[in-house]
Amino acid sequence: MSEVLVTGGAGYIGSVVCRTLLARGHRVVVLDSLTEGHRAAVPPGIPFYQGDLGDPVLLGDIFKKHAVAGVVHMAAYCLVGESVSDPEKYFLNNVVQGLALLRVMRLCGVKNIIFSSTAAVYGEPRESPITEEHPTAPINPYGLSKLIFEQALETYRQAYGLRYVTFRYFNAAGAAPDCGEDHHPETHLIPLVLDQALRQQGRKATPPGEGLTVFGLDYPTPDGSCLRDYIHIRDLALAHVLALERLENLPVSIFNLGNGQGFSVLEVVRQAAEATGVDIPYAVGPRRAGDPAVLVASAERARRYLGWEPQFPDLRGIIQSAWEWHEGHPEGYGTG
Ligand code: UFG
């Protein structure tokens, strides 16, 4: 029986993709460098390789040992701010190492790949919701690194018959029972808000600290804070499995994944306060460089061609699931 290689399978989203694949009867192999991921996030009992995508010997060995029919390629760096200060890190990991993966796949005859891309490829949106036809004009090296790899996939399709799907994620959020968000440093809104709630309750070893800063209240939005389209990681994961199962017959390759509804930063803070029962104080700071005011997806294409239907579209439920994980793992994967 064939297997699916998940690169970055120890990461926040990758660990849920592994579980979703397993639940639908696929066999899974994980490759992860563990620079960002957590060994404890990988489902027990599946083959795990610690290493880099840029290691052709290791990759060749994996393809020799396992009958890999497809790759879900999620291993990447993903911090916008860091990509601005250290773009080389992003080009090396997200582009050069990705190309190394494509090369070994080609040499080993592996033809199928699902790639994790981002809404950051669109840059400052000209319209909302954003469809896949929206021009791509990334405004930071992270988005650019993902766009370059998207284009490499298309070039490989034309030249070598590679079959691929690219998913442009909007704001991945929420948790599955065994998998949650544990980044160092954490920069994403929902885990930071929930972290504040835990600190307020005295449930973290470290005290409240500097607290939460809302980056900008002067955006042209109803309450002045940015609007984002939050999507549950379990819904993201499901899309990957559907794409893998339909890859041979898809007439299009690029799909947005979002819920089509924007929520403001202040609304997230308010709903998190309700979910946790904790008043979450915040300060208002300046805008964060590179943040568009509104990022909302049209995911009609994924519904139409993949039969994808989000099961957890409600922001309250997304925050609640994240809160349950944070409560059980106040210090991340080291606990709980
Ligand atoms: N925010 C705050 N305070 C914080 C953290 C975030 O106000 O401490 C705000 C941000 O300014 C933004 C919203 O909360 O308006 C969400 O921020 P996140 O950092 O959680 O997520 P982003 O919207 O920055 O990131 C998403 C995707 C990236 C993608 C980026 C493109 O996760 O992959 O959009 O802009 F690159």
Image: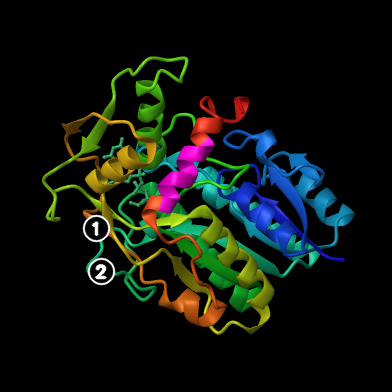
Q: Is residue 18 left or right of residue 27?
A: left
The answer to which quarter of the image holds residue 109 is bottom right
Identify whether 133 is placed above or below 62. below
- Residue, x 13% and y 55% (percent of image)? 222
- Residue, x 60% and y 44% (percent of image)? 177
Indicate yes or no whether the magenta region holds residue 63. no
Q: Which residues are magenta?
A: 317-325
Judge by depth and name the residue closer to the eye, 283 or 323.
Answer: 323
Q: Which residue is mark 2?
A: 128
Judge by depth and name the residue closer to the eye, 237 or 107.
Answer: 237
Magenta stretch mostly in which secondary structure?
helix
Instruction: Estimate the spatial distance between the alpha carbons at disc 1 and disc 2, rounded to whole Å.
Output: 8 Å
- Residue, x 36% and y 76% (percent of image)? 133
Residue 93 disc label: none
- SS at badge 1: strand
Image quadrant of ligand 1 equals top left
Horizontal and vertical percent for residue 138?
34, 57
Pointer 1 or 2: first along the chain: 2
Horizontal and vertical percent for residue 33?
66, 38
- Residue, x 64% and y 84% (percent of image)? 249
Q: Which residue is mark 1?
A: 294
Indicate yes or no whether the magenta region holds residue 321. yes
Q: Is residue 172 visible?
A: no
The answer to which quarter of the image holds residue 103 is bottom right
Residues at discs 1 and 2 in contact (Cβ within 8 Å):
yes
Q: Is residue 207 left or right of residue 285?
A: right
Q: Which quadrant, please, contains the N terminus?
A: bottom right
